Image (spheres, rainbow, N blue to C red):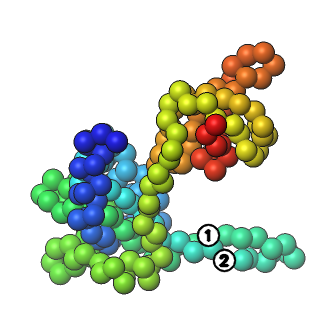
Amino acid sequence: MTDRDINREKRAKDAKWYVVHTYSGHENKVKANLEKMVENRGMIDDIFEVAVPTEEYTDIKSGKRQVKERKLFPGYVLVKMIINDESWYLVRNTRGVTGFVGPASKPVPLTNEEVRALGVQESVLPTVDFKVKDVIKVTSGPFENFMGTIDSLNIEKRKVKVFVSMFGRETLVELDFEQVEKI
């Protein structure tokens, strides 16, 4: 892990969840826009996560059962961030955002109990015992029992890109962490 990653983890522990009011029906657009703006402006050390609380439900139409998803709080998005002038301005001026929830639009952080009640899961990055250039064995999926060499890791998405030898040539495949084991 680099010094920047360690510093980001420390700052993430100090970050709090805030509720942002949006136009109804624009929650996912706001989430995508905000994530893109955070990445483009290099503010990943101030704004850590954006969530739209949803729940799954079963809908029965013409005798067919379908599992669907609906928003728990239409018109609201949760943002885990450290409040400063720059981060407040970025969130407040994202297209579709009408303001923070709180008195006089002053952001009020949610308590840990409120965050748990909303069903927001803290994203815990897994610790992995393999790195680039390690030789691994695929343990499940269509490439089961294949051997390969790790090309890259994406810890946030829990994915690994591996060169696997198929039909006499190296092919790059993307697998979940759970599908591979170090040899």
User: Residue placed at 37% from the left, 82% from the top?
Assistant: 114
Residue designated by label 1 = 69
Residue 111 figure quarter: bottom left
User: Residue placed at 30% from the left, 45% from the top?
Assistant: 5
Residue 20 lies, in percent from the top left, at 31, 69
View extreme (left): residue: 85
Residue designated by label 2 = 57
View extreme (right): residue: 63
Dot 2 amino acid type: Tyr
Callout 1 crowding tier (Cα within 10 Å): few <14, some 14–19, many ≥20: few
Residue 107 position (above or below residue 13):
below
View extreme (front): residue: 183
Residue 22 lies, in percent from the top left, at 36, 67
The N terminus lies in quadrant: top left
Residue 67 lies, in percent from the top left, at 71, 70
Q: Are marks 1 and 2 in contact (CB under 8 Å)?
A: yes
Check disc 2 and report its element: helix, strand or loop.
strand
User: Residue placed at 76% from the left, 70% from the top?
Assistant: 66
Residue 103 lies, in percent from the top left, at 17, 81
Callout 2 crowding tier (Cα within 10 Å): few <14, some 14–19, many ≥20: few
Marks 1 and 2, how far apart at CA: 6 Å
Residue 183 figure quarter: top right
Residue 42 position (above or below residue 88):
above
Left or right of 180 on screen, residue 19:
left
User: Residue placed at 50% from the left, 31% from the top?
Assistant: 132
Check disc 1 and report its element: helix, strand or loop.
strand
Left or right of 22 on screen, residue 123:
right
Residue 55 figure quarter: bottom right
| Disc on the earlier residue, 1 or 2 | 2
Residue 172 visible in the displayed image = no
